[in-house]
Structures are given as structure tokens and as C-alpha cells.
Amino acid sequence: MKEFFKNKKFGFYVTLALVALFIITAIVYSNSYGNTAFMSWPAFIVLLVGAGLTVVLVALKQDRFAPALALATSVVALCLYILDIYYFISSIAYGIQFSGIPVELIATMVLFIGTMIVAIANIFFPQVEE
Amino acid sequence: MKYKIVRKAATTATFVLASVLFTGTIIANANATVINQALGINSFKKVETNASTKLEDKIYYQSDFDNVGDLNKFGEAAVQQQIEEGTVLLKNDKNALPLKKTEKISLFGDGAYNPVFSGTGSGSVNADTVTYARSLKAAGFTINEDLENKYMSEEWAQYKRGTDGRFGQTKVRINGAPWDVVGPACENSLKEYGDVAFFVVSRIGGEGYDLLSGIDGQDKGDGLGNDYLGLSATEESVLKGLKEKKDAGIIKKIIVVINYSSMVEADFIKDPAYGVDAALWAGAPGQGNLAFGKLISGEYNPSGRLPDTMWMDNAKNPINVNFGHWIYPNAEQIGVSTMVGNLLYPEVTLSSYMVYQEGVYMGYKYTETRYEDQVLGTPNVGSYVYNDVVAYPFAHGLSYSSFDVSNVKVEKTDLRDYTVTLTVTNNSTSDYAGKYSVPIYVSKPYGDYAKKNEIQVPSVELINFTKTKMLKPGESETLTVTLDERYFASYDANNAKGYVLMDGDYYIAVGGSAHEAVNNVLAAKKENGVSIDESKIVGEKGDASVVAKFGLSYNATKYAISDAVSTTDGQRHQITNLFDESDINKYSGRGNNHVDYYTRDHWDKVSLDIVNGHPVLEMTRQMAMEVYSQVPESSGVYNAAQKPSGEFLQPIPKDDGAYPTFGADNGLQLIDLMYDDEGNEIPYNHPIWDEYMDQMTWDELKLICGDANHGTQPCTRLGKPQAREENGPNGMPRIKYTQMPNGLFTLYEIEKGNVTADGKLDKEKMDPEGNKKLTSFASNGLIAASFNKELAYNVGKTIGEQGLWSGCSGLYGLGLNIHRSPYLGRTSEYYSEDGMLTGIIGAIETKALEERGVHVYNKHCALNELESNRHGVQVWLPEQALREIYLRAFELPIIDGGAFATMNSFSRFGTYSGAACKPLADFLRIECGMRGAILTDFYGDMNGNQNVDPYYEQVYGVYYGTCDLVDGSQPGAEGHFDKFGPNTGYSKMAWAMREAVKRCCYQTLWSCAMNGISSSTKLVPITPWWQILLTTLDVVFALAFVASLGWTVVALVKEEKERK
């Protein structure tokens, strides 16, 4: 194991953090909206499959492709999330009286967008020593 | 290596941007209608192929105005007249009003400086408004500016009214500065401005919430919770403080203004402890409040009459026992969800109910009938003290003048008409000229036939009304009014199953409030030998001289046939029971349920137990089946763990019939269906319509009946323009005259050459009045209160003309539901507690709109008298009440006003939602002859987006002919029809869709949307600039991403080679 981590650089740990973020996002999203029309199950699957494949790439020492996969996962999941959550937001924008943004909405938006920003940054971080 | 960072950045950026843009494009395209409306973009343009066609030959609906400047002034005058003639002078001790302009005024209450101008939601205003303080100043009064500054200060912003909670759970806060704060603040200034203290009591309501139990009202333990419509402790403190100042001689008069579209509890106005000298009910004034100051100065003279009963205590109003929603206690047990949505609409949509237990005895029909029975000595009246119940009766209203009604005569002038003649004299000794509103009531016999067949007969019922011109002191006017005998008939749902004239004496009472009318009828009855207990008379003794009596014999055939011609077959049909299934006592699946509706024979059974007095009903299996027969197949998505039992799912059945023809080339444009070669209007059932409809494609059918968001979709290929429709009902304040290319404003400006090189309106050259906001009318109760038919017409005319000039060919209004309870949130949009008053005013306004090619979607038909948990509540009531009150309000505007369309109810008729109720559609189309479309605007709330159990699916509405169009659903519902396409075995669905679309096209044809279109005009669809931009950006970023990706792949291959 020590050998495995020997040549890893900062980016590698960000990639692992992204895997964790994918799983956390999937759990928070499904817990918040699982029983609602605002749940995108494809987004949920993309997050979990993306997390799994990223781990596989790392395990196969194909670290340099992991950031790209993580970025693709986060962007596709975010887009799928937007496609379902916008109904909720458009109801507010459409003039329905409303007071207070639900905490579930804030939490999921922060997670999806935050994950994508980290994934973008990770593209530029070295994963292993060249 | 040196390009590695750039390559990574380019690939990442283009990927992220392309993905997000693509997602945005999907969403934007799905919401194209809404975006186009928001940006003021039209989906088509007109190309005239025959240069010699003149504009005037293409204007089918002409305006009475030469320009919109004159129209705006006309609208302003109409809304001010609403305030002038609709404001009701409730009380005026020692002629406290009008005021002299030398009397200095202090204004108290947040509402004086921050009035409620309208309701919230669709009844909201969008205009330059005038506060009570500003209105009084404009009328020439001097007001206490020191106090005004306090109320307007940052420091006092904490005392403004407000709301708490999210939509569907909104609770209203009265707030207000208490006397502890106000008293010291005005201690000095009141010495100078103490001639008059105005106290404004403001209350607000609106779409989506009712007003039962506010936040800071006083809880009197009567079941009404923190009563929003009683005085709050803060308000009480201020009024008592003012009374102390009055007792100390610092204030001379206290005048109360009720600024609310419905009624507050008015006990305090009568209570000497508050020392109120005068009081006015002022509704919610829209943009017309400049008139208020003129009423106070005497420049205007009040002539309004209350459109509702004003109760001493709303806990004495038995309606409130049955106002709200209750859940069938056994619903879950038989598999029907009672889940409450947890996001925007926390409502129970499948298993809640409400019983209109009062039947016809609502408002004055309860208070006055129970009172009359007490005076007549009828058994079982129970404990009833009129003065403890009613503060001011329906149609009460004072004036600065006094009037006499005399020479009342009623003559039968033809087979069904009676002509009432009367003389009104202004006999006041003052200088005030004024108008006098004359309500006319009928008192029908409550005899053996009625008792035997359980027909309920209120003591008096408004049947018509009139109003004088401005009468100077000493001046008289003789008025005539026609009464239609049809409205002497009662609906007998049990024996004749139709309208019957009952055997016995009929009394016509002319003028006065409902209470005065009852006293007048009692006086006339006494003259005719009826025994009455005069010791029980409340108020002034009646005057038999303003009452006419005549007898009628039983007749069940005279009004058995509808007045209107059915649009389904061009025939007149027998009127018979349509709504047995909405009466829980007759409902075929009622099980053991039974409700004791109110009856004159047993007033003692009327419960005033607000908390527990409502009937408890059980849900039966048939109810469940019917509820689920209207819902999407995906119902249960909200509550995934508890999907409905398979036995409840009722998909649309397949059939082996032939589909209609699609896409035929018959060469017909919509305009060709207007007139035949002889210039006659082509009727709806003419065969040429089949030829036209054969041209439609399946996709066009789907689009039109699946998406009608604030307008119907165009079919430019066949000459059907997009019809823009706007939310009312208090005008169209959210649109501009430049809205549509077929608006007269745009057509005339183009004709004048005020266009830019690319054909758009030149904003520099065009009439600047075209940029002004359209008129925001006052709450509709003020029109009803004016009892002025001419004013009602002028309000309708303004809205119609503004639609015509802006090209908006439909109004989501009028609001014709009933002020059943003062706690109903949406009273600003509705007129009155009386169905006849609502119907008469509604018919006149409707006529004025329809004459201008602007179709009304009178809403929400019917029984939509609940806002909290409005979605899907099951309403149970007797058919007599449904017809004589709730449907009367919609029937008259269709039959007498020519209403083309209807927006249906959020509530259910029994188990069927307004959009799925076949008897209702039959009532509208067969009995009333309604020609246009039925539309629902609740579908957008119910398509699953709002996270409650949807209770209606548009495909069912179209299939059963109960709902043609859906508003408020973006993206539209056209995708829901995909499975029924050609050759899939659903021909009946295809034919139903075609009929719905035909109604829509017929409606568009006979609207101002056709202005500017001739047989030589081509409609050319336009792709909006934003769609072109989005698509271009999508392509650019996709190509950029592909290029970056290619670069990356090449670089990686190169790297790999170098590594090896």
C-alpha cells in the first residue's frame, strides 16, 4: 500500500476526494428528493458509476485519466440534476408566492456545483510524479 | 508541454460550457412560450400577399377610441368611479361625514399610508397607486404630516403588515403600531390635527391561501383561532386610545375605513366603547384611490351597498363551520393517499372534502330567512338574536342625501317579463346631489310543495337592480326594471327535476338592504293577513308600499327547456338534474354517508361549532375509483412507497375505430371559415369545419391541446394565429399595448409608418401612451357594491378595448366565484356572496369584453371557494344551491353576456375535478350554449412538478370533452398524447383531440386575434432570436469541444509514442 501511494501527488488525493463527493452528493440528493418529481435517478447512477470507474482507473494506475472521468461525471450529473430541479425553481420564478429557499435545494446545489468546480481544478493538478 | 495547460483549459472549458449550454437549450426550448411572452416576442409574422388589401378591411373588431391615450383616460375614470360608487358608507352618526376642508386630519393605522390595493396572486395590481393619506391631501385636506412621517419612518417599518410561511401555508400578519407607540408619537401634533382621526383597518388575501387563523389576531376561543378578520389587540389599543382622546376633547370625530375586499367583523363599529362616528367599507381600490378623498369632502356622494353581509362575529356565521377541508378518516384504509405534499403545495389532493351544508342559506339568505321565520313564529327557529349576528346586512349603504322610493308598480308585460316601475326622490335638505341604488328582491312562497320536495326558499332573494342618475335635492327620477319570471322559479331537484314555479304568493320588494326588504315584505304579508310577531321586528318597521304582491300557480313546464341553444347539436334541451352525483345524499356511491343540509324547518339544527360542527364523511370504494380515474398513470410518484392499488388504475380504453384524416390538402385557411359567400357567419357545426380540421396534422393537434400557456398555440400553416391571453380578473395590468402584432396599436402604428427599417415599432416615433401600463381595477366587490350596470359595462369595455389594442384576445377572468366565507383568500377577484348579483354584473362585463373580440375565461367554474388545499378538494352540496347560487354566477354571463370560454375549478364536483366533470361540461355547452373552450390553469400545479399527488390528467379531460386546453404547464402536456398517435388503436382519443382543437380554432376565429388577417395574408412562423443564438452557441461550443478533444487525443498519442 505504501508503494501504491509513494509517487502520488496532490491531484491524486483530490481525485479521491471527488470520489467521496460523488457518493456524498448521491446520498444527499436521493435523501432530499428521492420521493419527489425532482429526483433524477440517471444523475444518481452517473454519480455512483463515475465514482466506481474513477476508483477502477486509479486501481489500474491509469491516474492521468481519472481527472477527466471525474470531470465528465460531475458535469453530466450536474446537467441531469438541473433538468429535473428546474421545475421547482421555475415554479418560484413563475410568480408563485414563496418565502425561503429550502435547505435541501441549497445543499444539493452546493454539492453538485462545488463538485464540478473541484473537478475542473483537478484537471490541472498533477496526479503522480512524472 | 508548453501547450499542455492551454489544451487542458480549452478542452475543459469547452466541455463544461457545451454541456451547460446544451442543458440550458433543452430547458429554454421546453419553456419557449413563456420566454417569448416575457421577451415580448411573437411566434409568427404576417405577410400580405395582396398589396391592395386595406387595413380597414382586415379589422373585424373595431374600437370606440381613436387612440390609447383616450382609452387610458376612460379606464382611469372607470376605476375612480368604482371607488366613488362602490364605497359603502356604513355609519354616519350626526353627519360626521362629509368633512369640511378646514377640518384637520390625523391618519392612524399602517393601511392609511400603505393600503391594500388588491389581492395577491392573479388579482394583484401593477399601477401607480394612491394612499389614503395622499388621496385626502389631493382632495384639499390638511393632514398630520408629523404622524405620517412616523408611520413612514424606518423606525416604524417593523409595524407593517406581512405574511409568514411559504406558498400554500401562508399566514397573514396584521401587525401595526400599538397605542403605546402611537400615543406618545402624536401627543403634540394631535392638538393641532385632532378635528378628525381616521383609523384604517387593512386586510389582505390572495391566491393560494385562506385567512382562517392568522398570526396576531385575537383568539376568542370560538374556533376561529387568531382571528385575522377581527380587530387585533394592537388595533384595539389604538382605537381605545383614540376614544380616550375623544373623551378628553382632543379628537372630535373618529372615522373608520375598512380596506379589505371582503368583510371584517364589524362589532367594534357599533360598540360605543370605541366611539366610532362614521365608517366606510372601501374594498381594495386598485389604481382608483384618488376618488376616496373626494368622497370624504362631499365632492362625491356615497351610493354603494354592501355586496356581502357584514357579521358582528364570524363565529356566528355557520358557513365557517364548513369552510376548510377535511380528510376522509378511512381513506388510507381503502388505499387512497392522504399524504400532504412537502414542497410548494402542501395539500391533500385525493382524499379531502368540504360540504356546503348550508345549501342555499348562505350570507343574507341565512341571516334574513332565520330572522323572518322568527318573526313569523315558525317552529324550531332556535336561539337567534339578529343584532348579535348581523352588523350590517347585505345591500346596506348610506348616503349624504336621503331618498324616498314611491309609486312602486309591478306589471306583467309579456309571457315571462314583469316590469317594475318606481320613483326615487332625493328629499334631502342638504346640498348634496347623489345617486340611489335600487336592489329588487323576490320573496317566493315556502309552501307545501316546497316542504314536501325539500325545496329551500330564502325569505328574500336579489333578482335585479337599478340605479338612478345623479339626483339633486328635490329631484325625482322614475325608473323601470324588467324582471324575468324564470328567476321566480326554484330548482326542484327531487320531484320535477327542473325549475318550477310554485303555487302561492310572490312579493317583489323594491329598494333597501336585504333586511329592510324582509321587513317590507313582512309588512306586506301582515296586510295580507299573515300573522307576524311585531315584537320581534329588528330595525325600522317595514313599508308595504314598496312591495308588490301577485300569485302564481304551480308550473313545472314553463322553464323546463333551456333558453340557450346547445353547441353540440343546435337544439334547446330539457333542463334536468345533472349534479345528483355531487350531492352526497344522492351520490350513487355514497355508502352510509348522509348530511343534514340546512332547512327552514329546523334552524335549531344549525351548528356553530367551528371546530367539530362539520359533517364527518367516509370515503367509499366508488369514490376512490372515480378519484383515480382522473389521475395520470404515474400517480403515486409523490408518495412512491404507496402507489395506488391496481384496481384503481383506469387507462384510456383502446378501440378499433377509424382515425380522423390528418394533413389533407383542402386549401382552407382559418379566415375562410368566418363568412360564407353570402356574407353569413359560418356556424360551428358547418361541414366546412370538417374539411378544415382534416388538414391538421397529429403533431398540430397535440401541440394545441397540450400547451395553452397564457394563450393558444398558432397553426400558421392553416392561418390560425397565436392567441395571447392574459391573467385577470381585475384588468390586464401586466401587458403593454405593443404586446402582439395583431393589436390595434401595432397595426395602426405600422399603418402610420412608425416602424424601423426592420419592420419593428419605432419607439421614438410611436405614440408614447402605448408604453403606459394598462388599467388596474379595484377589487370586484366594489363593482358589485356600486349596483351600477353602466359602470360594470365600462369596466368590461376598458378591459376589452385594452385587449383589442394590445392584441390580447382573452382574459383569464372574470372571477365569478362566490364570497362564501369572508375568510376566503381570493375575495378581491370575486364580486359578492350573491350568485345573482355576481351573474348580472358578470354578464354585463362579459358582454363588453366579448363585443370587442376579447374572450373571457370566467373562472373558476365553479365551487372554487377555497384556497388553502384548493387542489382536488371534494365539494358536496345539493343541486338546488349549486344552480341557484354558484352556477347562476357563470350561467348569466354565458347566456346573456355571450361568454365564449370558461376556466374550470380547482375543486371537485363530488369526486370529479372541475376539469373532468362531464355534467359541468354538459351544463356549459348544452344548457348554456357556451361556444368556446374549457381551460384549466391548475394543471401546471398538478403535473407532478409540485410534488403532490396529481389529481387530474389532461388526456382524460380531452377524452371526455371536459377540458380542452391547459394553461400554466411548461413544458406543455403534448407529450402525454404520444401514445395515442395514428394507428395505435385510440381513434376516440384522436377524435376528442380534434374536437378540442376545433373549439379552440373557432374561438380564435371569432376573436380580435384575427385582426389584420385577410384571405390574402400569410402567417409565417418566426424562430425567435434567442433560439437562433442558443443553437448557434451550442454548435460553436460543440465544435470547439470536438476540436479540443481532437487536439488532446493527438497530443496523448504523441506523448505515448515519445514515452515508448
Image (spheres, rainbow, N blue to C red):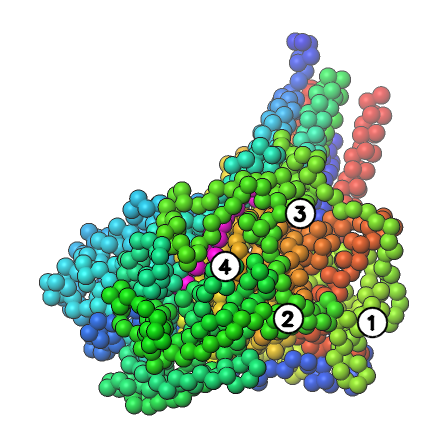
Residue B817 makes an appearance in the image:
no
Tag 1: amino acid: Pro
Instruction: Please state if B781 lies on the left or on the right of B851 as rendered.
Output: left
Magenta highlight: main SS: loop
User: Residue at 65% of width from left, 9% of height from top?
Assistant: A2
**Front disc: 3 or 4:** 4
Q: CA distance from mark 3 to mark 2?
A: 31 Å
Question: Which badge, 3 or 2, comes first in the chain's sequence?
Answer: 2
B1052 in relation to B52, above or below: above
Instruction: Tell me the residue that label 4 is attached to.
Output: B452
Contact flag, marks 3 and 2 (Cβ < 8 Å): no
Q: CA distance from mark 2 to mark 1?
A: 27 Å
User: Residue at 82% of width from left, 63% of height from top?
Assistant: B696
User: Residue at 65% of width from left, 31% of height from top?
Assistant: A119
Q: CA distance from mark 3 to mark 4?
A: 37 Å
Asked if both marks, 3 and 4, belong to the same chain, the answer given is yes
Contact flag, marks 3 and 4 (Cβ < 8 Å): no
Which labelled disc corresponds to residue B687? 1
Tag 4: amino acid: Lys
User: Residue at 22% of width from left, 68% of height from top?
Assistant: B277
**Front disc: 3 or 2:** 2
Contact flag, marks 4 and 2 (Cβ < 8 Å): no
Q: Is residue B352 magenta?
A: yes
Contact flag, marks 4 and 1 (Cβ < 8 Å): no
The boundaries of the magenta stretch are: B348-365
Instruction: Tell me the residue that label 3 is attached to.
Output: B630
Q: Quadrant of the C terminus of chain B?
A: top right
